[in-house]
Image: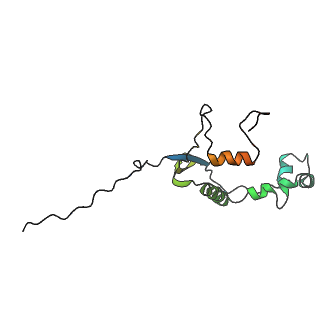
Amino acid sequence: MAIQPEPQPAPPTSAASPAVPTQWEYRVVHINVEPGKPPEPPDPQVASEHLRGTLSPDFLAREFPEVYGEESETARRSRHPAEQLQTFLNLLGRQGWEMTDSSQVGPLLMFFFKRPLRPVPKLIAASQPKAHSQAAAEADAEAGRSDAPPGQPT
């Protein structure tokens, strides 16, 4: 009695093309790193002193509330640098960027991000003939559209 080898499964055949390696796009962001305390919110008194008293603090506060008001955009932007950086990094994350590294080069702190390269839509060449399917032609006819020149029956 002869021993027959067990049949081996055939290697899987794939109709799809070989896998394309992921392509990446990169983004580099730098931040100036200066020693010292974070900047203070705008102060009309300090601004008036900087202008050598030409404009009073009351005038500056009254005429420029968007800069010197309690809830001004400038005051909101003057948050602690860590909070500003967190907001910025969260924005990049929502856009699909992943931080891969950070490194300091002199006074610059560099952040490196990457995300998969997004496919670019293919452009249809103007020289290609129109390819209307039967369903598209019927929809055009129902909507009263036609490829026939104006005044010609459809």
Image side of residue 127 versus residue 68, left or right: left
Measuring 74% from the left and 56% from the top, which residue is drawn there? 77
Q: Nearer the viewer, residue 131 or 21?
A: 131
Residue beneath the point at 90% across and 48% down = 53
- On-image quarter of the N terminus: bottom left
Q: Which residue lies furthest to the bottom in this view?
A: 1
Task: Give the camera-side residue of 116 and 129.
Answer: 129
Residue located 75% across and 42% down the image: 145
Q: Nearer the viewer, residue 132 or 111?
A: 132
Res. 91 image quadrant: bottom right
In front of the other: 20 or 81: 20
When asked about the image quadrant of residue 44, the answer is bottom right
Q: Where is residue 67 in the image (x, y as percent from the top left)?
A: 83, 53
Side of 53 relative to 16 (left or right): right
Q: Is residue 107 visible?
A: no
Expressed as whole percent of the image width and height from the top left, the position of residue 60 reads: 89, 52
Taking 73 as reference, is 54 above or below it? above
Looking at this view, name the residue that lies furthest to the top. Answer: 127
